[in-house]
Amino acid sequence: MSADVELNNVSVTFGSFYAAKSVNVKINGGEFFSFLGPSGCGKTTLLRAISGFQDPSEGSVLIDNKDMFGIGPNKRPTSLIFQNLALFPLMSVSENIAFSLEVRGVSKKDRQKRADELLELIALEGQGEKKVHQLSGGQKQRVAIARALAVEPKVLLLDEPLSALDLKLRQRMRTELREIQKRVNITFIYITHDQGEALTMSDRIAVMNEGEIEQIGLCDEVYNNPLTPFVATFVGENNPLFGKVKEINQNKVKIETPDGDFLSTMNENKRLNIGDEAIAFVRPESLFIPRDGDNFDNQIDVNIESFEFEGNIKNFYATLTSGTRIKFSIPNAIDTSSISSGTKLQLGFESIKSSILPKAQLAID
Amino acid sequence: MKPTYFINFMMGMYIFIFFAYLFGPLIVMSITAFNSAEFPSISPWECFSFRWFNEGKIAYDGQHLAGLLSDWRLHDGIISSLIIGAGVVSLSVPIGMAAAIVLTQVRSQLRDIYYSISIMPVLFPGVIIGISTVVLWDRIAGLGGDGFISDVGRNGIFLTILAQTCFISTYCFLIFVARLQRFDQTQEEAALDLGATQTQVFFKILVPYLMPAIASAAVIAFLFSFENYNTTVFSILSDQTLTTVIASKVRLGISPALSALALTIIALTIIAAVTYEILRRRSEKKYAQSQEIFVKEKAASGRINKEYKAGFKVPKGIVAILLVLVFATYGATQIVKNDLYGQSCIDAADQEKKSKFLEQLQTLESNELTEEELSGGSLGGTEDYGDIFGDPSLFQDFGGFD
């Protein structure tokens, strides 16, 4: 059983401070939805508004088309997984998992049965008698998920639960979370500042900044067609090229920058006029070293400053003629041994892989 | 001598002096409990005896000096003290806990004010709390005529429980505040989110977490109540607690029965402390074992390559134990050698004292004053106190009991 969650014009204020401002979003039943944003952008506040710890100052939260105003967290069909997990240290694993049933007066036998079922779901069979401190980080994570699922909630809310884990475990848990979501088939609302997490797990994501939603969309849509400079630079990496709009031809826009003119693609929703201040974005992986026969829409002269080896790719940091710094990545499979600091190169990129947006705040200021 | 040895030696001396200062009086007092003399002393040593733990003695002049077992006033005092202690614990712990929980809910500047007010009772002199309780309840008792209120308002035990709770609940408050500061409030939120009501959160999450604090607050409250004097002496009215009994005994001249009582209390304290320590170590060991099993399960087999086995180790306190044994043996041999124990010794000592007393009595009788001297005349005294306070300078240097 899953439920729709709808936020209608939700604002949460603390004094004169807007933690969330006029948020409108409709999350479908059974969807894996992520709120993505930097620390302090208001995503946790939104989660608390959905779970019932914080009533919105304005607007309404609807779960299953029912206004939740004034209904406490213990009466809502939601379960929250806390950032620090908040497992009960004085109880055993089974007691933790069955806590929600205990407070509902379920008999001990039924509680034990349900706890065993859930232990099986999270692959921790036979470990119910252990104390929480005897579990490893990933196991604690799974116990927290089982505890939240024990009440059969319609919506599961996750507040950056993976942030304390190491990289390998985090990657494994991403897959596991996704699988659990498919198995139990309920709505997952996930909060994270890690765009990798959001992109790999979610059906749709909402990018937030300073209490407001900047963009809602499918993962590849948000990545490929960002609506604001903030989204462009927060989700994945992006090189901004500042300039003025010189020519507009349908959705192809020519921007004039100190480093030359570049052809870029304009999002249909964003209107630009000739002479407007704008930023063209090009991602590190979309910049190529041209080989014979290659013909790119745009050429750009760079001077290599330094590089780093990341494994599957090699990252190069370079300056343009105006001094602007850019980054580009070359797959490790391509031989780049001839390039070292001080090398002058001409790179190319396709206009279709570059997006142009009106000048506004970036995420990396 | 190497400088480190010198430093170690000085350190050892310092620690020795420190503990001698701390425990010296207690040790001396404990030894006096076994001396049969009426006045607690080590020297001169009369006889080794347990009489002050038992019946005490009837002195040669007919005065009964009660021992620990036969002193009904002491027994009544202990019983009142226990009742008051239980009352204070059952009031102070909930009050302290409630106040501490409220502190976690209060935000902003109000928090500091609330905290200051809450800890204020420990800053008041106990005497003032005692007197003000009596004054207030005397008025309240006066309102209700002869009924229940009047009885309660003039009941010393009830008033003492209230008066002591005033400041003891503050100590409990401080214990709870310290524990609550480390409480992860998301646990409460997690429980709420899982469907628990506020009451369930309190009893299933907060109370179990606070259990150690509840236990230590109860112990502290009981100990503070049991040893309190300056509040109790006013609020107890016509009843007596252990402390007021002891104080009134001191007024009449101290007896070795008090040493016996002190030794008993010290022994009980030490037994309790040692028991607690043993239990604590045992549970710690259990925890360490479970952790070890956990690590062994988790770690790859190659990581733990050594099996540690603890051999027999000489406990570090062995020097102190040996020292005590040496002194005890020396004392015992001295007592046996000089025949300073048993009934025969006590009888001999009594006989000696009795003869001394009779001698003194004869001297006094021979010096008896004439009627004329007693009525003022030649001594220059007045009739009013001449025969009662023979020496008017007797109480001159007396500064009071407290």
Image (spheres, rainbow, N blue to C red):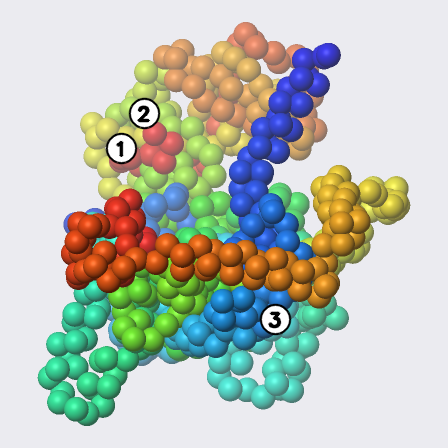
Asked if badge 2 and badge 3 are on a common chain, one would say: no
Horizontal side of A355 relative to A69 (left or right) equals right
Query: Are callouts 1 and 2 both on one chain?
Result: yes
Crowdedness near tag 3: few (<14), some (14–19) or many (≥20) residues, C-alpha within 10 Å? some
Task: State which chain disc 1 sits on.
Answer: A
In the rendered view, tell whether residue A257 sits above or below residue A77: above
Give x and y (percent) for residue B303: 83, 42
Secondary structure of residue under mark 1: loop
The mark found on residue A359 in the picture is: 1
Q: Residue at x 29, y 44 (%)?
A: B397
> Are the two marked residues, 1 and 2, in contact with CB atoms closer than 8 angstroms?
yes
Indicate left or right for B310 with B174 as reference.
right
Q: Which residue occupies the foreground of this view, B85 or A251?
A: B85
Q: Is residue A15 visible?
A: no
Question: From mark 2 to mark 3, how far is it between C-alphas?
Answer: 100 Å
| Numbered mark located on residue A242 in the image | 2
Above or below, B306 against A67 in this view is above
Which of discs 2 and 3 lies nearer the camera? The answer is 3
